[in-house]
Amino acid sequence: MNFCSACGNAVIKKIPEGDNRERHVCVTCEIIHYQNPKVIAGVLPIYGDQVLLCKRSIEPRHGFWTLPAGFLENGESSLDGALRECVEEANAQVINPSLYGLFDIPQINQVYVFYRAELAEPVFGPSSESSEVALFDEADIPWSELAFPVVELALDHYLRDRQTGEYEVKHEQIARPWRSRRA
């Protein structure tokens, strides 16, 4: 950030009085510009014993499989964002959503919120963000072609929970470098 969004003058990086972190501060109007993590909301859509995945047709990770998820919009709840992303990326409607996981990735300033939900019916399809959308049995999940570590982690948790029938809300921090549980 080089310029203040309020007055257009230069900003400098400094620790504001009473704070403990370096921030962008306007040299003229002294407004502090906070830069906060991005929130990504998504759905783990289930149909019977299958999981719905989307093959990305956009960067980053074009051509890799993911759960339907995306950046939360201003004025949107995490659940509303997750449901919107499921429609945008998979053309799918889900029912009975429940909070499933909160995954922190502080090194890239992201927080993921996933909801486990059932596909209302097996109706889904590609979109401008997904070249393919498909249901996968556990044995057919393309583990080596998953787009992001958080997707692997969420799927891994779900498959273990499915064996017990207990789906407790998860909270985990993803460290870098990521070590695949499937390697």
Image (cartoon, rainbow, N blue to C red):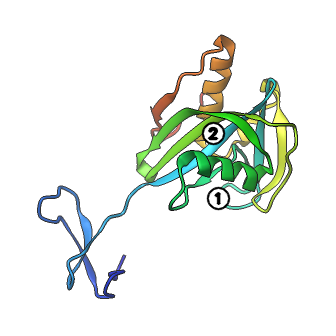
Coordinates of residue 38 in the picture (x, y in percent): 47, 55
Rendered image: mark on residue 122: none
State the mark number for residue 60.
1
Q: Neighbour class for label 2 at 10 Å: few (<14), some, many (≥20)? A: many
- Compared to 31, does 161 lie above or below? above
**Quadrant, the C terminus:** top right
Which residue is more in the foreground, 120 or 1? 120
Label 1 secondary element: loop
Q: Nearer the viewer, mark 1 or mark 2?
A: 2
Looking at the rendered image, the quarter that the N terminus falls into is bottom left
Look at label 1 and name its amino acid: Pro
Q: Earlier in the sequence, mark 1 or mark 2?
A: 1
Q: Secondary structure at mark 2?
A: helix
At a point 58% along the width and 39% down the height, the residue shown is 114
Viewed as shown, does residue 167 lie left or right of 108? right
| Amino acid type, mark 2 | Val
Question: Residue 19: image x %, image y %?
Answer: 17, 58
Is residue 182 among the parts visible in the rendering?
Answer: no
The residue positioned farthest toward the left in the image shown? 17
Which residue is nearer to you in this view: 136 or 63?
Answer: 136
Q: CA distance from mark 1 to mark 2?
A: 14 Å
Look at 67% across and 61% down and name the residue there. Answer: 59
Q: Nearer the viewer, residue 13 or 144?
A: 13
Residue at (20% x, 85% y) in the render: 28
Tell me where residue 140 sits by quadrant.
top right
Residue on which disc 2 sits: 151
Residue 4 shown left or right of residue 171 in the figure: left
* Residue 30 appears in the picture as rendered: yes
